[in-house]
Image (tube, helix red, strand yellow):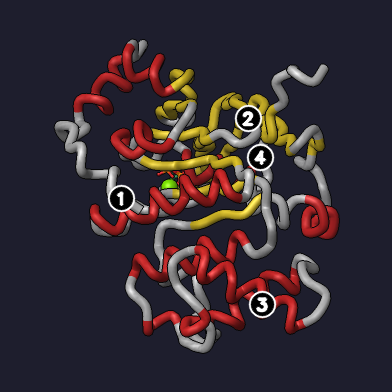
Amino acid sequence: MATQHRPILQVNNLCKDYVTRGFSHNAANIFHALKNVSFEVDHRQTYALVGESGSGKSTTAKIISALEKPTSGTVVFDGDNYTDDSPRQLRRDIRGNIQMVFQDPFSSLNPRKSIAGALLEAMEIQNVGNTKRERLDAAESMLERVGLGSWALNRYPYQFSGGQLQRINIARALVVEPKLLILDESVSALDVSVQAQVLNLLQDLKEEFALSYLFITHDLSVVRFIADRVGVLRKGTLVEEGTVGEVFANPRTDYTRNLLDSIPLPDPSRHQLAG
Ligand SMILES: Nc1ncnc2c1ncn2[C@@H]1O[C@H](COP(=O)(O)OP(=O)(O)O)[C@@H](O)[C@H]1O
Ligand SMILES: [Mg+2]
């Protein structure tokens, strides 16, 4: 059926346990970082995952991007259950389709690699482009698209500001032509005005490249600006989820109400910068 709702990502009953050791020897505890977490990200939509520090957001992101295996549960991309795939299969099927942008713009890039080197390496690993010339052209046009330009190609990370580096990290994620972008607190370290510019850029890129986003943040004012649906994680449990309108208008838990109460008073200029 053409009208059938078709998620790009399905997260089913995800559990993740970590074995932790106390101070006394032999004392091992099991810490349940994720407890039966399920949600779906629809094609060309933004799903925001919110929650306090330590609630399990990054653990969820790492499992979806196949950097970690879940203790149980499955992750399904475009109908393909890749939970138990080998590294070789993952490289071919998932790593190109799901890309991640992290919080710290500096530590995500190798300080000894030029920007061209970083983007070309990402494309080579995913077999994007037939020749070095083609890859350089793609790198240059993506850098232009994120608001930089060919001048950035032969520079090194230390020569850029945090906001510029996050644009470069976004460009590096997009040159491999992914369908889903996971943004794990990707704007949290930026100044508010720079944050607004990068959020606007992300909105434009999503339309232009028909992307879907999993947007992880602890900042609910950002959720209101960018997301279609939102899930609230608390201590490893998804305590509520729905459209942003539903959840913000009728929070079902005190936890979400408290998160909402901590949003600063609406400042219309905040995420509405032109261009
Ligand atoms: N490798 C690990 N070993 C043990 N505990 C971990 C590990 N990774 C994360 N945790 C714990 O799991 C919980 C969730 O972590 P995380 O997913 O990073 O939270 P968030 O991103 O929401 O701040 C935290 O209590 C954290 O200390
Ligand atoms: Mg985190």
Q: Are marks 2 and 4 in contact (CB under 8 Å)?
A: no
The amino acid beneath tag 1 is Ala
Q: Nearer the viewer, residue 20 or 224?
A: 224
- Residue at image x 52%, y 35%? 46
Residue that mark 1 sits on: 274
Q: Are marks 1 and 3 in contact (CB under 8 Å)?
A: no
The amino acid beneath tag 3 is Asp
154 to 7, vertically: above or below: below
Q: Nearer the viewer, mark 2 or mark 1?
A: 1
10 to 251, vertically: above or below: below
Q: Nearer the viewer, residue 24 or 224?
A: 224
Q: Nearer the viewer, residue 158 or 131?
A: 131
Residue that mark 3 sits on: 137
Lower position in the chain sequence, tag 4 or tag 3? 4
Query: What number is the disc on residue 70?
Result: 4
Residue 237 location, x and y as percent? Answer: 48, 25
Q: Nearer the viewer, mark 2 or mark 4?
A: 2
Lower position in the chain sequence, tag 2 or tag 1? 2
